[in-house]
Image (cartoon, rainbow, N blue to C red):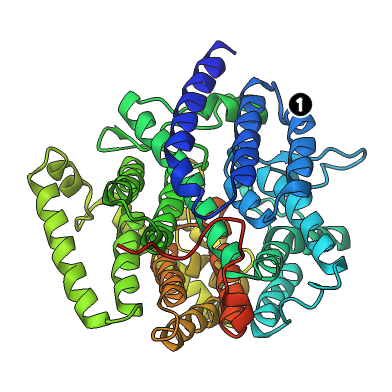
Amino acid sequence: MLASLKALIVVLAIAATIFHLAKPLALRFMSQEDFSRRRLVWLVLTAAGFVSPNFWMYLLVAVPMLVWANRHDSNPIALYLLMLHVMPPVGIIIPILGNNGLFPLDNYRVLALCVLLPATIRQRKNPQHATAGTFGAMDILLLAFGVLQVALYTPPDLAHHFVIPDSVSNALRRAILFLLDTYLLYFAISRLCRSRQQLVEAAASFCLACAVMAALAMFEQLRVWLLYVDLVRNWSGDPYAGFYLTRNGVLRAQASAGHSISLGFLLAVASGLWLYLRSHVSSRIQQIGVTLLLWGGLFATDSRGSWLGTAAIYFAFKAAGPRAMSRLAKGFGVALAVAGLIAVSPIGDRILDMLPKSGQPADLYRHRLADRGWELVFAHPFFGDQFPWPKMEDLRQGEGIIDIVNTYLGVALNYGLIGLFLFLVFILVAMTRAYAGARTLVNSDADLAMLGASLTACIAGTLIMINSDSFIMGPQKAFYILAALTAAYSQLTKSPRGRLAVPGSGNVQPERR
C-alpha cells in the first residue's frame, strides 16, 4: 500500500503540473468549465484507483463521477478521450453464479457504459440531432467485420491445446462485446462530433491525455519505476502481472497505457493531431514545448515501430496538405536537422543501438512467424484458421505465448482474406475521404483542410504501426477513434453550416502571426 501511495503522489504531482501548463492551450479548444470538470474527474479517478484495493471499490467512485461529468459536459466525446487511459486497461471478470464469469470489465468498457452509451441515447432522443450522421459504407463494412467475429470462433491459446467449445451464449457474448467495444465507439464519435468545434476539441482532449502520459513515461524511464505496476497487481490479484520490459538494459516506459508499445502508438497518433492543433498556437515556445514533450514520451517507450509511425505521420501530413512539394522539401530539411542534432547528442548512440539490425533474434522470430502464419492463411484463404496454435508450436516464446505482433496477419489468420478485406477497406475508405475533403477545402477553408490532412496522416501512420503491433488495448482503440473522427470530418465537409466554429466554447480559428 505504501508503494501505491508513493506512486500516487508522483502521478498527481506530474499530472497537476501538466494540466496547469497546458491550461492556456486547452482553453483555446474548450471552455473553462469543461476543462476544470474534466481535470477534476481525471485527478479523482486516479486517486481512487491507487487507493482502492480492488477494481470494484474503484467503480464505486468512478461510475458516479463519470455519470455526473457526462451529464454536464458539452462534448462527451472529449470527456471520453481524456479519460480513455486514466487507468490501465486491466480486465476483471464479472462473476456470475454457475459460470466462469460474464465477461471482463475494464476502464474502456466502464467509459463506454457511463459516457458513450448515455450520450448516444441522449443524442438520438433529441429531435434536432436525431438525424445527425448517416448509415453508410463504413458502418456496413464495420458491422460485416463484426459478423465475422461473432460467427468465427477462435479458441484461446491454452496449455496442451485444450479447446473451449463454442456455444450460443458465447456467440451472444461476442456480439455484445463487439457492439460495446467497437461499434458503439465508432458510432458515438462519428455522430456526436457534429461541428468543427466538437471535432477539434476531441482531438485536443486526446492530445492532452497523451501529454500527461508522456510526462509520466519520461519519469518512469528516468527513475526506472513503473508507476502503475502495483495497481495492476492489486486489481488482477496476480503478483506476476505487470512486468518491467527493457531493451538494451533500459526500461521501456508504459505509464497507464498498459504496455510500452501501446503507449508509443498513442503518442504517435497524438503527435499527428498536434501537427494540426499547433496552428492555433501563436507561441513558438509552446509549439516546441508540446512537440518535445510528446517526443520525449515516445523516446521513453523505446518502441521502434512507433518512431517509424511518427516519422510517417509527419511526412504524410506535409504531403496531404496544401503546397505539398514545398512543404515536403521543408519537412525533409527539418527532419535532417533534427536527425543531425540527435546524432551528436548523448542519446544518439543509444538510438542507433535500438535500430533494427539483420540477424537479431527478435527480427528472425518475426520473419519465421510471418512465413508460417501466411502459409496457414493461404491454406485457409476465405475464413482463416481458427485453431492455428498446434501448427505454430515451435514458435512459442519464453513467456509461453505465440506472439503474433502483426495485426494484418492476426486478422487474416482468424478471419481469412475476407476479414482482412473488410478490415482494410473500412479504414482505407476513412483515409480517402479525409484526403478528398482536405484537397477540396484547400483553397476555401485552409484550416479545415489541415485537419483533414492531420487525420489522413494519422491513419497512414497507423497502417504502418499495426504491421508490428498486436490489435489490442490502445492501438485498437486509436484505430477506431481515428476512423470515427474521419467519418465525422467527412460529414462536416459536406455541411457548410457544420464547418462554422461553435461560439462561446473555445476559439478554433487560427491566430494571426
Task: Choose top left, top right, bottom left or bottom right for residue 495.
Answer: bottom right
Q: Residue furthest right?
A: 97
> Mark 1 sits on what residue?
57
Left or right? Give the position of 351 relative to 275.
left
Please say whether residue 419 is visible from this viewpoint.
no
Picture coordinates of residue 455 (x, y %)?
Answer: 46, 70
Residue type at numbered disc 1:
Met
Q: Is residue 395 above or below residue 234?
A: below
Quadrant position of the C terminus in the picture = bottom left
Task: Choose top left, top right, bottom left or bottom right for residue 172.
Answer: bottom right
Q: Which residue sits at x=87%, y=42%?
A: 99
Q: Residue furthest left?
A: 344
Report how many numbered discs are placed on residues in the image: 1
Q: Nearer the viewer, residue 97 or 37?
A: 37
Q: Nearer the viewer, residue 441 or 234?
A: 441
Q: Which residue sits at x=52%, y=29%?
A: 228
